Image: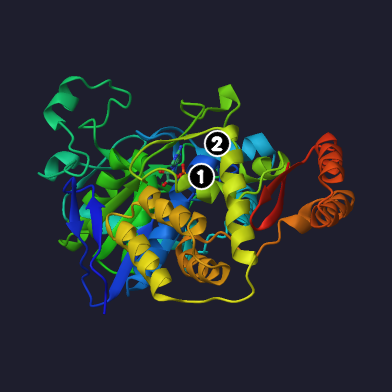
Amino acid sequence: MTVPFKLYNTLTRSTEEFTTLHPNLVKMYTCGPTVYGDPHIGNYRTFIFEDVLVKVLRRFGYQVERVMNVTDVGHLVDDSDDGEDKMEVGARRDGITAWDVAKRYEERFLKDLDTLNLEVPEPLVRATDMIGEQIEMIRSLEEKGYTYSTSDGIYFDTSKLPYYGELARLDIAGLQQGARVVNDEKLNKTDFALWKFSIEPGKRHMEWESPWGTGFPGWHIECSAIIRATLGDSIDIHCGGADHIMVHHPNEMAQSETVTGKPLARFWCHSEFLLVDGGKMSKSLGNVYTIPEIIEKGYDPIALRLLSYSANYRSKLNFTFDGLQVAEQSLKKLRAVYQSAAEDQLTPEVLQLIGEFDAALAEDMNMPVAMAVVWNAVNGDLSKAEKRAFLANVDQVLQLRLDQNDQIQVPAEIAALLEKRQAARDARDFALSDQIRTEITQLGYTVLDTSEGQIVQR
Ligand code: AMP
Ligand code: ZN
């Protein structure tokens, strides 16, 4: 039995009752990282959203088949098919081949997934492992008369598809009039590359033979081909960051639907962008933070999960280190509450709160409301065992590693002082307790006294 669930659909710009093509089964595709550099915290906002969506779907009774791609070829520096392949840029920067760049950053991505307690999508499919499928799809588009050739590649003629741009609500006529012509051989501004020719065959690290000559696939065709090969012609949910609404997803849709004659996805779901210090992340501002950098600065990376639950996934979220610190304090508090009881006690009061938590999830995954229920439960007058039972249950969605012992992560010197202070407090020697607190502060840590005992922070 599945639970009624409402989900916002970018395609219809409305929140709809969630239904599936096959009973109780969700086929879900999530556009993955371009592995030419370290993924940043913005990418992880989207990947956390997708991970939580999977957990919510399972909680509501669905089996989920989720596929993610790894873009390891063809994503050009400019989304309108100009400029260099990002992989080749990475190769020059790192002084290794594009193949080694892909390997290096895919490994870093997998490590980050583990760090953030994100489930590895199964399967995770590399674009370069499906070149044949992509060529097949382009051939099919060619046979149907949707392609044309220019001096640099094979393009999709978007004017042949009357509803092209529906997802993005594109004003095609207006776009054509105001077109800034970058690639003057393109017939329409919105046309996009399916296959790019190698300018000098043999020079690129990544290139393949095709019916149109040596080259490499355009960025969008990989997702269409991977979806078809792994999930079939039509899926239930297609996800990505909000930047995909304008170009990448309309193009995937155009290719797939032209080939299959069927709708590619029922629900198109997009998470809004993570901003840093109120603005866009950019290399020049030096605010494109990675997960290893968050760890290096001394933060618990799981706090990033909690931070992302503070806003609805469809609203922009502003990242600051102050915000991350607050999220980390909250995380420690939740862990301390969870660990303060040895056993779970599932009572009607707990079930009532779990019901409220689920009700918030059922409304288009309203995480801020769901988190308000969590704080009500944690700060309310349930017993410790009831609080533990509640947290254990909601953590199936939140994935906060509640078992992690934050106290033992402090240096031995601090741990000893904490123990001494606890003994002083137990003996009601508050002067000594305060003196030890000052000592701990001087060593760069702060102690909070809570009903669950001392919590130490950096
Ligand atoms: P990319 O590696 O650029 O292909 O992006 C991987 C995923 O991260 C895509 O779904 C993007 O839409 C998403 N993404 C990129 N930048 C951000 C950001 N600042 N906030 C949220 N999601 C993002
Ligand atoms: Zn995609």
| Of 3 and 269, the residue lying toward us | 3
Indicate the position of residue 378 as horizontal and vertical percent values. 51, 58
| Of 320 and 140, the residue lying toward us | 320
Indicate the position of residue 174 as horizontal and vertical percent values. 14, 24
Residue furthest to the bottom in view is 1
Q: In this view, does 351 lie above or below 370?
A: below
> Which image quadrant is residue 441 in?
top right
Find numbered disc 1 in the image and state the secondary structure of the residue it sits on: helix
Q: Spatial distance from mark 2 to mark 1, Cα to Cα?
A: 7 Å
Position of the N terminus by quadrant: bottom left
The answer to whether residue 451 of the structure is visible from this angle is yes
Find numbered disc 2 in the image and state the secondary structure of the residue it sits on: helix
Q: Do the residues labelled 2 and 1 touch (CB within 8 Å)?
A: yes
Dot 2 amino acid type: Gly
Disc 1: CA contacts within 10 A as few (<14), some (14-19) or many (>=20): many
Q: In this view, does 236 lie above or below 45?
A: below
Residue 323: mark: 2
